[in-house]
Image (spheres, rainbow, N blue to C red):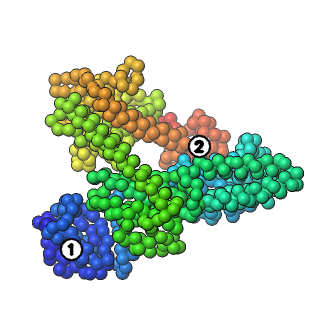
Amino acid sequence: MSSSASFDSKAFLKQLTQRPGIYQMLDAEGKVLYVGKAKNLRKRVSSYFRESGLAPKTRALVSRIGGVEVTVTETEAEALILEQNLIKQYRPPYNILLRDDKSYPYIFLSDRDQFPRLGFYRGMKKRKGTYFGPFPSVQAVRETLSFLQKTFRVRQCEDSFFRNRSRPCLQYQIKRCTAPCVGLVDEQDYQRDVKHSRLFLDGTADSLMGVLEQQMEQASAQLAFERAAELRDQIASLRKVQAQQVIESGSGNCDVVAAAMEGDHCCVHVLYVRGGRILGSRSYHPKVPLATTAAELLADFVPQLYLRGRGAADPPEEIVVNGEISDSDLIQQVLSQQVGRRLHIKHQVRGTRARWLELATRTAAENLSGRVAALASLSSRFETLGGMLELEDVPQRVECFDISHSSGEATVASCVVFDHSGPVKSDYRRFNIDGITPGDDYAAMAQALKRRYTRIQKGEGKLPDVLFIDGGKGQMHKAADILAELGVVGVALVGIAKGVTRKPGLETLYLATDEGDRELAAEQSVLHLIQQVRDEAHRFAITGHKQRRDKKRRTSPLEGIPGIGPKRRRELLKFFGGLQQVQQASVADLARVPTVSRKLAETIYSALHNE
């Protein structure tokens, strides 16, 4: 097997060092194709250029190589960290890439306060206190906080709200808080509730129930029956939560990571276990350009999951996987250094951990089967769409535009993109529409299409095979005029009219052709695809419109006026008593403000009255 003609692999390998480091494979244009690490750079890179024995995916990579750059490191551990940093920076097409989303959610306990607060937390752990998690989703955090609020009644209000109360809030009235803000609970009793909440979050529910049962017996012996009943209800709530757990037995903190592969598709399912309780789970469907087995997938996936910087998950004491990872000792070493404690990666487990691993493996396989079936169905719908539109080839990429506004205010146009794998969210675009008559959807569509396809004509993106316009004949004709004006050819243009009833499944489709438009009779499978694309464009447009509208309403009209900073804004509002009075003031009135000159008053007046 030989690489591309422009790269002399034999000459390069002769002078390559045998020290540890990372290697970057580049194409002919210098773009990074793949980043890897090696204990011995010469030995590892040489394995890509042997004459036989390479997997088809690896041969495809090698055929595109135009150069290789290496960086030597002192240790293999340094190489692993540098590899993950470069993957995140360059996002090479042949590496596994996890979506760099927001950091994982936690529950935060401000235990440095006199009356600590429990709350949702996401981000860098700069605040002093105790963090419990990570949780797999925001919903899991909310469910846990709701249970704690009903059971132990520790406050969850913001500190600013807590400090300024003069009487109990609604949470006290509905028995979700003990009102420490106004002194209706003493500090000792409140700290007891905080301790119980901590025990629950630490996963020691059995010992917590033992403590509560003992306190309930003492309260009964002292004839404090109301307190005993309260403790009885807390114990009942804890038992109910335990009964809802997937697996009740077991202890310890671990993440169970199971991978399943089928052809070019894969699923990695992660169970989050804390204190023997499964807090939740999360499935990933990364692209696997080079991995051919579940073990190879895990070897790339685990470092990506835990070494991604701010958005990475905090690893627990154990990571249980369903395949033997070749570099598990190295990954253990780097992760242990990162978290400052011992960490173990295991693939051979017994007892409860084996049942957790079986559950995760089965879930990964089922999720993968469902995804493969869904993708096959989506590809079939694309084929049917191509036949309906009488295209020579099966369409590979479709786009849809939609317009959203509130009576002409804060108009936003959306463009969503779908291919055979579903939504391509990295290619989504929103356009803030300005300079048109409010409510003129035709002008808004024209502006969005011009901006979108002018950029594509300049090489900043890809043309779709099919373009959907949500708005019927009129919008479709406007889109056809814009595409003709820009010289865009080879795009099938379809208008979507919702119909009189505006019910899903009863849309009318129009195809723009050289002879004029004609109505299409769509099969049900194609209608489902079109509805999915149209609804996504609608959602994306509405979200952008609401964000723009809310931002506008949160922003003072005084902001952005030249010469008006925060200090002058405060003086204007204080002098006139409010924004409405400032807007009603004349130039002479504005000039009466001590720090406002006549010229500045004219500028303010013109800006507020759009002159």
Q: Amino acid at mark 1?
A: Ser
Q: Quadrant of residue 302?
A: bottom left
Which element type, helix, strand or loop, lies under badge 2? helix
The correct choice, above or below, for 59 with respect to 417 in the image is: below
Query: Tag on residue 252?
Result: none
Q: Are marks 1 and 2 in contact (CB under 8 Å)?
A: no
Camera-nearest residue between 325 and 16: 325
The residue identified by callout 2 is 591
Other-residue count near label 1 (Cα within 10 Å), few / some / many at <14 / 14–19 / ≥20: some
Q: Which residue is nearer to you in this view: 141 or 515? A: 141
Q: Nearer the viewer, residue 375 or 467?
A: 375
The residue furthest right is: 223
Q: Horizontally, is 610 left or right of 296 in the view?
A: right
Quadrant placement of the N terminus: bottom left
Which residue is found at the position 62% from the left and 51% from the top? 242
Q: Amino acid at mark 2?
A: Ala
Q: Is residue 106 above or below residue 442?
A: below
- Where is residue 428 drawn, in percent x and y? 35, 44
* Quadrant in the picture for residue 481: top left
Q: How many marks?
A: 2
Which residue does the numbered mark 1 point to in the structure image?
46
> Quick check: can you spot residue 601?
no
Instruction: Report, in whole angstroms, how far the alpha carbon at label 1 lies from the one at label 2.
Output: 78 Å
In the image, what residue occupies the spot 46% across and 33% down?
409
Residue ranking furthest to the front: 351
Residue 516 vertical placement versus 56 (above, below)? above
Query: For the view shown, which residue lies furthest in the top direction?
Result: 500
Foreground disc of the pair 1, 2: 1
